Image (cartoon, rainbow, N blue to C red):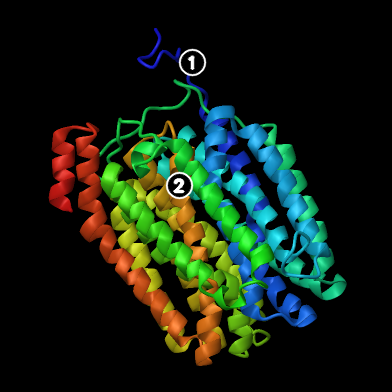
Amino acid sequence: MASMTGVEPVERVSEWYRWVQLVLGIICMVMIANYQYGWTLFVPEIEKTFKWTRADIQIAFTLFVLFETWLVPVEGWLVDEYGPRIVVFISGLLCALGWWMTSRATSLTGIDGYYAAMIICGLGAGGVYGTAVGNALKWFPDKRGLAAGLTAAGFGAGAALTVQPIQDMIKNTGFQNTFLYFGLGQGLVVCLVAFLLASPKLGQTPPATTNVKNLQTRRQYTPGEIVGVGTPVVLFMFFVLAGVLAIYYLFGKTWFPGLAQWIPLWMAALILVAGLAATIARGEPVFMLMYVMFVLVGAGGLMATANLAPIAKDFKLAETPVTIWWTLPALTFALSIDRVLNGLTRPFFGWVSDNIGRENTMFIAFGIEGVGIYLLYLYGQDPFWFVVLTGLVFFAWGEIYSLFPSTCTDTFGSKFATTNAGLLYTAKGTSSLLVPYASVMQKSTGSWDSVFLIAAGANILAAILAVAVLKPWRAKVIRRSGAGAEVEADGLLRRA
């Protein structure tokens, strides 16, 4: 019998097949992890070689994250329309091309500079990331938090095993060769795996689970219904925003140098204000609450990701030996532990959220991160505590990449999960607009104290918002959409 949508259901696939699809997505995520998490290893070498300021170099990282995130809704729409294989294959080619360009770049701006190269990397990594997470959300409606967490773990922990090899290769053959060979190898693996990916058809997966802790909507929201404007307009908006920022940094900084440090802040404010206005007028304002929370938590983690090596060098402990079961230099130890914990936290907190609720888990994780950053402010100049506390911070940060996609799909449905989760994922790009200001604050004050304190406060605020505002509000939205029994929604509201 045909379904109400007119699509004939097919036979349920085996558990083995679902897990193979998940593993394929994880492999792709591991291959793109270094584009974000390996960047900090190259920054000191680029700074030393070309004598550029650290803040200007980190704009390349900002552009990478922007294009990795802001165009995920566009790439997600392509996946929802045409399937994952072609999108991931082209994305793998872009990943390889991007680091090939960095291996040859001798300037920041222009079409052959670092900014352009990292834009290409961002386009490729975003296509892989959005597809892998979207596929996990679709294949595992019954284990959504765990599946999204395992997939995101590939991105978080994927760089752990290559920290030492990248450091050694930079030291022995130079950072340009390291960019070249790692970029080509990672891109090739993504292209090969792309041919094996598939999206689920109606009937191939188990039904979504609904309980008092994690209500799931039965309504399938389009991106336009969430944001308040038509889907083509939403996708075009992020395409234009990314293009404007890229053109400015590639060609316009020399024309208007005095505006350079303010453009990212203005753009972040524009996105938040415009999004809030649109969702209040015609969309779902609860989406913007999730977006703001993502920005609050994401900004601190991205600042740490981009600046961990510079912070360690400023604290004069990068090469200091630290012993925890075995002995390594503090920076190498911190990077390795951080990558592993940043990966493990995603399936761990995803599984926890499947059992105790998304918002309750957010409160715990964001609170731990806020406390961890504050302790890093107090004790971070001690090599041992630098390693331990940065590990704690990354453990409590990485879970946003499993909790927010799961919460979004629970609230707005799985049919357009790749695009809708991609829209929320653009908050990571908005967060990245704030990353250069960490270097600006450090330079103006001579210390990292203000950066640590602001990031700690932002996480504590997000933790409070999760249980005090998001939890009851999201329950009302799901009840209004007709999902679940009234008694379940009422029970969740009473617990909120």
Is 80 placed left or right of 179 in the picture?
left
Q: Inspect this view and state whether residue 179 appears.
A: yes
Residue contact between numbered discs 2 and 1, judged by CB atoms under 8 Å = no
Whether residue 298 is visible to the viewer of this picture, yes or no, is no
Q: Is residue 438 depicted above or below 279 in this figure?
A: below
Residue that appears at 48% across and 15% down: 10
Q: Nearer the viewer, mark 2 or mark 1?
A: 2
Q: Position of residue 98 (x, y in %)?
A: 74, 55
User: Which type of secondary structure does the marked residue at label 1 adopt?
Assistant: loop
What amino acid type should be assigned to the residue bearing mark 2?
A: Leu
Label 2: element kind: helix
Task: Give coordinates of residue 410: x percent, y percent.
Answer: 34, 40
In front of the other: 403 or 473 = 473
The circle on residue 465 is none
For the N terminus, the image quarter is top left
| Mark 1, residue position | 10
